[in-house]
Image (spheres, rainbow, N blue to C red):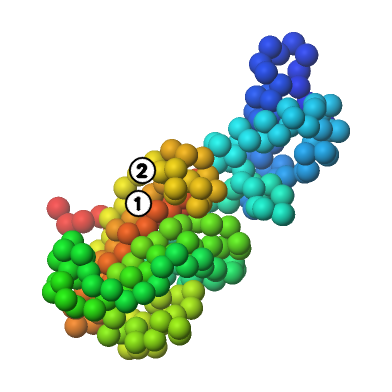
Amino acid sequence: MREKLSARADDSTPLYLQLARNLRNHISEGGIDPGGALPSERDLSEITGMSRVTVRKGIDQLIEEGVLFRRQGSGTFVTKLIEAPGSALSGFSEDARSRGEDPGVIWMIKTYATPTDEEALALSITNSTKVVRLGRVRLSGGEPLAIEHAVVLAEFLPDLDLLGDSLYAALTTSGARPVSGTQRIRAALATPTEAAILSIQEKAEILRIERLTRMNDGRAIEFTRSAYRGDRYEFVSEIKVGES
């Protein structure tokens, strides 16, 4: 590893950029598996002969690129890209558990309210209809991955104290599990607030997702807008040849 990561004396590139390049190549060649831990700054400093400041700057460069991410109190890890099914109607918690990870949630808002004009139109309800307004940060393995703002018909969530990390699990219990819907995804840049919440750089790439789901009878039940980390997610859909 020393030979692969050490700087070259005949290279005029700044040392921290040499380290970032060498680490990037080492990772791409399989030197560290996705999700694997990077050696500590102290160890990298000893391996490369570079100062801790230079090592930290090189690591920060790769974090900004999305190659690495820091987990508070645990260290720095190689980013593992999550392939989410673009055509399957599933929740964040289900997806996390299917990958063998523990989902988590930080609640920003969880209350009964009335819908805005836009929300009422999307859900085909009146402005006086009671809804549940949910705002939360979604975590997987303790890492913040998404910010979700959802509006759900209140009649199917009569007790908010029973709502855990999974909205769809609570709706299933109420007999109102969504079975179909539409989803729109577009690329965007993180606002300062979103960047702080998701522990990413300001103006880093994110995926804005708008989802409207329906029950068996065709009635709309959930309208959600989310911001997912673009460095951690890609949505994959199966495609087939259509009729000509």
Image quadrant containing the N terminus: top right
167, 32: nearer the viewer: 167
The secondary element bearing badge 2 is classed as strand
Which of the 4 image quarters holds residue 54? top right
Residue 60 locus on image (x, y percent): 63, 35
| Residue corresponding to mark 1 | 208
Residue 134 location (% of width, % of height): 37, 69
Q: Is residue 15 left or right of residue 90?
A: right
Q: Are marks 2 and 1 in contact (CB under 8 Å)?
A: yes
Q: Is residue 162 visible?
A: yes
Relative to 45, residue 78 above or below:
below
Answer with left or right where residue 91 lies relative to residue 127: right
Apparent side of residue 183 relative to residue 56 in the rendered image (left or right): left
Q: Residue at x 51, y 68 (%)?
A: 105
Q: Are there few (<14), some (14-19), or many (20+) residues within 10 Å of tag 1?
A: many
Which residue was labeled with disc 2? 188
Residue at image point 77% right, 39% down: 41
